[in-house]
Image (spheres, rainbow, N blue to C red):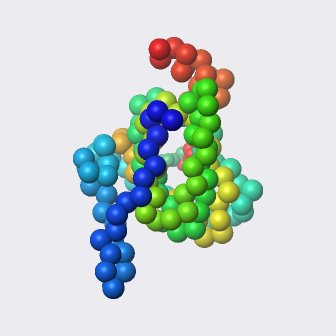
Amino acid sequence: MDGVTLFNICPHGDNRGELYALEYQKELPFVIRRVYYICNVPGSNIKRGFHAHKKLRQAIICLGGSCSITVDNGKIKEIYLLDKPNKLLILDAGLWREINNFSANATLVVLASDVYDENDYIRDYHEFILWRGGQK
Ligand code: TYD
């Protein structure tokens, strides 16, 4: 889907373990202005997200455990499984996302291109569809 990239980061691995680096203009197409993480999700029935961003770009990694992210561009949906710490999902702006199937120990780290701004959120799906239509 346009605006979504999922790729495997190459480890700087040796017999001491794996080290992963995320660097601007290499793995990351934007400068990080905020980091947040989600952990201790109390059950696999929990669903999060249910919003889109007007401008924000994000890079998402599941550092431990696993979860699924459904990305919706208003026409099609794709499901991305994040189950390894080397899988990096990069989402451009303008995509609806839902996060579910959290495993017991899931730790989801989100690197964001800007500081928190509630005005950048679209939290109503119908509004998202209307907004997408107005972007063309
Ligand atoms: P919310 O958007 O509901 O999380 P999710 O997208 O995972 O469903 O955010 C939960 C709360 O945390 C909400 O009150 C907004 C707040 N919040 C911040 O204060 N800063 C942040 O960077 C984020 C992502 C959320």
Q: Position of residue 34 (x, y in %)?
A: 37, 49
Q: Position of residue 117 (x, y in %)?
A: 44, 37
Q: Is residue 114 left or right of residue 93?
A: left
Residue at (66, 52) in percent of width and height: 100
Q: Is residue 38 left or right of residue 41?
A: left
Q: Position of residue 62 (x, y in %)?
A: 51, 61
Which residue is the extreme one toward the bottom? 15
Which residue is the extreme one toward the right? 45
Q: Is residue 18 left or right of residue 73?
A: left
Residue at (55, 16) in percent of width and height: 133
Q: Is residue 56 left or right of residue 126?
A: left
Residue at (57, 49) in percent of width and height: 80
Q: Is residue 62 visible?
A: yes
| Depth order, front residue of 51/79 | 79
Residue at (62, 36) in percent of width and height: 77
Quarter of the rendering containing residue 73: top right
| Depth order, front residue of 119/43 | 43
Quarter of the rendering containing residue 31: top left
- Say how many tags the image has: 0
Q: Is residue 117 visible?
A: no
Q: Position of residue 111 (x, y in %)?
A: 40, 51
Which residue is the extreme one toward the left? 25
| Depth order, front residue of 98/13 | 13
